[in-house]
Image (cartoon, helix red, strand yellow):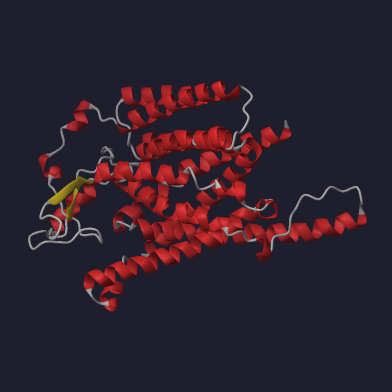
């Protein structure tokens, strides 16, 4: 049908956009300044709001012109819905509350674990969660029935798991990493406190940069750095050592859990607020508000740690406007296109089918990882990735 064709085209567009919006996260500018995940997420949120505002403005102009045409031609079918603030739905806040922390975790995952493996992990999680929401909870009817949906999601997960596996594999020659790259480098974060001996020299910082998979560097994407989490003395004097790569994988999984639920409020929002690009505009406004509250919360945490409001503000990460404005806005633009296309695909195909097809984005991100970031070294891994991609498409 026409609706299904529109849904499949929207899903294809969403896959291209979602598979590419993570590229600027690992770009040269983001790596050079070691951009904070929440900073990058803030750029994305602002870009989503900006793009949605522009689209709504154009939509309202077309709606006015079409409305005038309807008056002159009674047989004309009205298709544009003029959006106003009365169409804003509070359900968008739930989507934003899930998206902001999930997107921040996704930025960290891409920066520390790699683009291909991160997108692979959260795509697998999203497919499974979407199946639970769409088929089991919402009771969306599939042409092949419930059993056919189970078989489809199983085959899809096999392909996605294969893509994730071959995206993370290292050839034997790459496993012999120089001993100097295996140095444990401490990093001070709002979650970890620095001890007296936990300082690094400028030279060690340079070594850490070599581990972050610069574009075309040919290095595997795995980060050999380690985070040290110092537990409060009242609980334990132990220090927990967590490799950044493993933490990146966990954050990719967390992003998948949250991202799979982002579009669920779309089912409960009033119909007039989801027509056209209405929900995208509501989402952009809500996302920007949630980002502001996230920064206020982080400021409070830093102020408590520093025992000073001023010092807490000074300890917040820089936005690096000169370096990060362009890649941050580009990532937000690509995400906005994917988000809008994803909304259309879900409305036309249902939550399970629409959102699951959107996760073909991991194929796109894998191609970026192979040809641009060199994250998948070795002919065997590349062949396995391509084979798994064929399974996903079948």
Instruction: Please state which of residues 278 and 136 is positioned toward the viewer in this rendering.
Output: 136
Horizontal and vertical percent for residue 54?
62, 60
Q: Quadrant of residue 52?
A: bottom right
Quadrant for the N terminus in the image: top right
Q: Is residue 184 visible?
A: yes
Which of the 4 quarters of the picture holds residue 388?
A: top left
Q: Quadrant of residue 144?
A: top right
Q: Residue 163, position in %: x, y?
A: 39, 29
Name the residue: 91% across, 47% down: 75
What x and y, as percent, mark residue 119?
A: 40, 39
Is 56 rendered above or below residue 224? below
Task: Name the foreground residue: 45 vs 293.
Answer: 293
Q: Up-down: is 294 above or below 103? A: below
Seen in the image, is 239 located left or right of residue 382?
left
Residue 262 located left or right of residue 164: right
Q: Residue at x 56, y 56 (%)?
A: 92
């Amino acid at each position: 049908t026409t609706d299904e064709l529109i849904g499949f085209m929207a899903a294809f567009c969403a896959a291209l956009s979602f598979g590419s919006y993570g590229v600027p996260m690992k770009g040269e500018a983001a790596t050079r300044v070691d951009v904070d995940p929440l900073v990058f997420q803030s750029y994305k949120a602002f870009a989503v709001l900006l793009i949605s505002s522009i689209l709504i403005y154009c939509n309202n102009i077309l709606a006015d012109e079409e409305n005038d045409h309807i008056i002159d031609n009674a047989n004309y079918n009205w298709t544009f819905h003029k959006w106003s603030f009365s169409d804003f739905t509070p359900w968008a806040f739930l989507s934003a509350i899930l998206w902001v922390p999930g997107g921040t975790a996704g930025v960290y995952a891409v920066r520390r674990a790699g683009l291909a493996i991160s997108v692979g992990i959260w795509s697998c999680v999203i497919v499974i969660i979407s199946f639970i929401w769409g088929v089991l909870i919402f009771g969306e009817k599939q042409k092949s029935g419930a059993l056919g949906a189970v078989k489809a999601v199983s085959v899809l997960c096999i392909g996605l798991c294969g893509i994730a596996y071959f995206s993370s594999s290292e050839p034997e020659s790459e496993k012999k990493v120089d001993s100097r790259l295996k140095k444990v480098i401490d990093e001070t974060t709002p979650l970890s406190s620095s001890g007296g001996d936990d300082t690094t020299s400028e030279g060690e910082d340079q070594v850490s940069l070599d581990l972050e998979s610069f574009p075309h560097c040919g290095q595997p994407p795995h980060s050999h750095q380690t985070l040290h989490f110092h537990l409060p003395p009242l609980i334990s004097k132990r220090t927990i050592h967590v490799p950044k790569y493993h933490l990146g994988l966990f954050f990719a999984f967390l992003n998948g859990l949250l991202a799979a639920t982002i579009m669920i409020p779309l089912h409960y929002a009033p119909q007039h607020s989801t027509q056209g690009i209405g929900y995208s505009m509501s989402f952009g406004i809500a996302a920007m508000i949630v980002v502001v509250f996230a920064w206020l919360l982080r400021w409070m945490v830093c102020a408590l740690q520093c025992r000073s409001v001023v010092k807490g503000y000074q300890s917040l990460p820089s936005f690096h406007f000169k370096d990060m404005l362009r890649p941050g806005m580009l990532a937000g633009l690509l995400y906005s296109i994917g988000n809008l296309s994803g909304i259309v695909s879900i409305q036309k195909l249902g939550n399970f089918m629409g959102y699951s097809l959107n996760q073909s984005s991991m194929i796109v991100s894998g191609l970026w990882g192979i040809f641009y970031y060199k994250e998948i070294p070795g002919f065997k891994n590349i062949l396995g990735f391509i084979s798994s991609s064929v399974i996903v498409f079948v």
